[in-house]
Amino acid sequence: MPKSVSLLLGVHAHQPVGNFPEVVEDAHQRCYKPFLETVFKYPDFRFALHSSGWLLEWLMTHHPDDMALLRQMADRGQVEFFGAGDMEPVLAVIPYRDRMSQLAAMSDRLEQYFLQRPQGAWLTERVWEATVVPALADSGIRYVMVDDYHFLCAGSERDQLNGFHTTEEDGRRLDLFPISEALRYRLPFAPAAEAVAYIESMADETGSVANAPAAIYFDDIEKFGIWPETYNWVYERGWLKDFIEGVLASKVIRSAHFHDYHREAPSRGVVYLPTVSYSEMGEWTLPAAAARRYAELVHAAQHEGVLERDRPFIRGGIWKNFLTRYPEANWAHKRMLGLSARLASLPDALLRQDLVELLHEAQANDAYWHGLFGGIYLPHLRRALWHAMIQLERRLDALQSRPASFSGDVDLDGIDEVFMSSLALQAVVRPDKDASVIELSSYPLAQNFADTLRRYQEHYHEKAKIGAATAKEHDGDGIASAHDVVRFKHEIKPEDLTPDTRGRGLFAETWTDYDIKLPVEYASSVVQGGAVLCMGQAGETRVAKIYTVKDNRLSVALKAVGRGRLSSRLNLAIPCCDGPAGRYVVNGEIPGGFGQSFTWDGLKELALEDHYLGGAIRLASNLPARVKVQPHMTVSQSEAGFEKIMQAVELTFTWEVEGPTEIQVDLDVLPIKAA
């Protein structure tokens, strides 16, 4: 019998909820559009496509002509659409009810646009937990994609991974296709002829199509045009054209759909996979020290020549570890879960589709984690989550009111956070040693002004410390993957990589006495009449802090007994960051923007205006203060290389204290015209 292999090829298109329009447009011009135009010319080349719902809606609105090509390919049976959670959540970290609504929303969208209801689903970041099986099966999904690495971690042999296997959970069945890592690393980085030859090498002599092995590929479409060098390689130099023509000209490769192969071929047997994602994720989710140890183990195995054999058993962490690594992500996640529970508790008569859509947006995965690319380090992605959550909370409050103040351990850290709210503003105080405000949400502006990120030590910072000398040139034919190249978008200095020792909330105090600086550590907090009273000490100096919220104002009263200087640091998340729409206003003048540093003496009032947001913050002190402002920057990775990103405006108020002193700071959130 002749040899044959079924090529099951799928691509995953995604842009984060809230991404900049110009970034999405650039992605379309360099990737989505040329990809569709190229594959459209080859009706016999079958492929699968998953696009996150937010991106698909954007493309339908902004590029209907290109989407018309996709409809034609759907009509002629060239493309199979895959489902998923509509706003690209990690299904494993949202409740069953939300998994069902997210999956249904995506399937409904595909049926509306392309008259296809998906049988297969894409798992966000290939995050696998057996707990997701019931919702997927109950939603009509029959199979999903995971990495072959998932199977290897369960002890499977690589030569068994050329078809689908079956698993079950709580009485529901789901079939699993293992994505070939070897193909992921070849497409589109190896020369087209080499990639085709590799697929042909997977062919085997079979008695029927049903028994033919499958070459299984499903990966980010952004690798076909957006990653460095890929636009020139894939389109201008013709890689995609050559690859498709090579596949169609092959006498052993059958270009097939997943649903056809799934219908024709038998399962290769039962499998139970561990909780895992792709191998790189296992490293990214670890804290820096643990990630270094993991890298050492990988290097040692590589040196001993056993890495390929033992890599499935040298595993890092799981995706949920990001919620322990980044308290900011954990806070957003737990707040999202609380809103989900409130929405689920509404009587049916009050439930509206717009509320469900806001919850779905708040569950978009991108700002909850960090890997090779920005993720949680990108303020505009975090802002999109909070924008949806704040709008949802405001509408839920209008349907079912809450107390003006209450407390509870929302983020499961062993400390009861205190919520204080009005119709316009909500402040959340975490009564730990800093007793600072960890959330300051304006309902009219749908902005959390405490949504910043502290400076963390990241494992990959070691590469930045070494500097450009670590930059690698690609050896051999083809082009390098973004995983393998070290680039620098900005100059990175050692001080840029120094991790924070304190959180980045609002109102964290320091006491200076004879040039000795001590953090004010608060030991007790009580809630009285809607106010939060915190008692602290720095050395022999006692400090009290009282928070209140009224209308659009957060007031902070500080009482100190001693002689020295009391400083209070605020980190305010301003949407425009260091862009041209943000500026300081001091004594009626505009000294500059948020990306600059200033120090003013004897100041009692200043404003921060953000014309992008259409809002401003006015800070007023009853006593004159030295006010120092500067941008708070972090260092992270993107496909362009190491870069510095402004997370917040850091303001430090310092007052001279001579004996018992009472300080009052009022923070008003206002529309621009009232600032």
Image (cartoon, grey):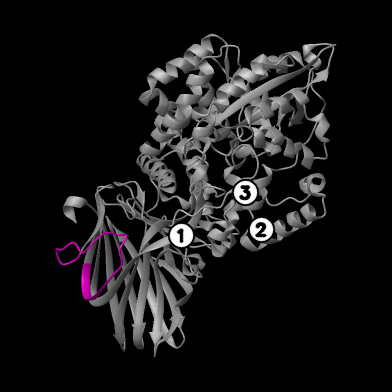
> Is residue 153 shown to the viewer in this render?
yes
In what element is the residue under mark 3? helix
Query: Where is 312 relative to 43, above or below?
Result: below
Name the quarter where the C terminus is drawn.
bottom left
Of callouts 1 and 3, the N-terminal one? 3
Crowding around mark 3 (Cα neighbors within 10 Å: few <14, some 14 to 19, many 20+) is: some
Q: Residue at x 20, y 64 (%)?
A: 591
Q: Are marks 1 and 3 in contact (CB under 8 Å)?
A: no
Which mark identifies residue 634? Answer: 1
Q: Main secondary structure of the magenta part?
A: loop
Label 1 to label 2: alpha-carbon separation: 19 Å
Of callouts 1 and 2, the N-terminal one? 2
Name the quarter where the N terminus is drawn.
top right
Query: Where is 455 relative to 320, above or below?
Result: below
Q: Is residue 14 magenta?
A: no
Label 1 to label 3: alpha-carbon separation: 23 Å
Residue type for callout 3 = Lys
Q: Are marks 3 and 2 in contact (CB under 8 Å)?
A: no
Q: Which residue is mark 3?
A: 320
Label 3 to label 2: alpha-carbon separation: 15 Å
Q: Residue at x 62, y 40 (%)?
A: 92
Task: Point out the stretch of residues depicted in magenta.
Answer: 586-605
Q: Nearer the viewer, residue 237 or 507?
A: 237
In what element is the residue under mark 2? helix
Which is in the foreground here, disc 1 or disc 3?
A: 1
* Residue farthest to the top, as pictured: 76
Q: Which residue is mark 2?
A: 291
Residue type for callout 1 = Thr
Q: Position of residue 294 (x, y in %)?
A: 71, 57
